[in-house]
Image (cartoon, rainbow, N blue to C red):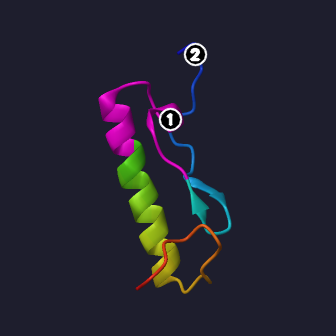
Amino acid sequence: MPPPWPLTRTSRFAPGRYVCGDHRATGSVQGALASGARAARELLAGHAAGRPAGPGDARRS
């Protein structure tokens, strides 16, 4: 990973689409875990705020 690298990139990619992985944080297992946790927090925050579901959101059964 050549510097500089933004360590706080949002996981919201587009309306209803979230992305996570070590490529969104640092190239490591810790980076992947941190990115996944950030994506989950952003997804839950959007759900709590009442954002409409987009085509990439998980379907409810």
Above or below for 46 versus 30: below
Above or below for 4 versus 61: above
Q: Which residue is mark 1?
A: 7
**Residue shown at 62%/69% (left/top)?**
16
Provide residue 35's location: percent of width, then percent of height: 42, 45
Label 2: how many Cα within 10 Å (few below 14, some 14–19, many 20+): few
Residue 44 or residue 21, whichever sits in front: 21
**Residue shown at 35%/53% (left/top)?**
37
Residue sitting at the far top: 2
Q: Amino acid at mark 1?
A: Leu
Q: Amino acid at mark 2?
A: Pro
Provide residue 14's location: percent of width, then percent of height: 69, 60
Provide residue 21's location: percent of width, then percent of height: 45, 40
Q: To which quarter of the image does residue 55 belong?
A: bottom right
Provide residue 23's location: percent of width, then percent of height: 51, 32
Query: Is the C terminus in the top left, top right, bottom left or bottom right quadrant?
Result: bottom left
Q: How far apart are labels 2 and 1 at the CA level?
A: 11 Å
Q: Which residue is mark 2?
A: 3
Above or below for 12 versus 60: above
Q: To which quarter of the image does residue 60 belong?
A: bottom left
Above or below for 50 versus 28: below
Dot 2 and dot 1 residues touching (CB under 8 Å): no
Number of disc labels: 2
Query: Magenta segment: does it hold 59?
Result: no
Magenta region, residue range: 19-34
- Secondary structure, mark 2, is loop
- Secondary structure, mark 1, is loop
Label 1: how many Cα within 10 Å (few below 14, some 14–19, many 20+): few
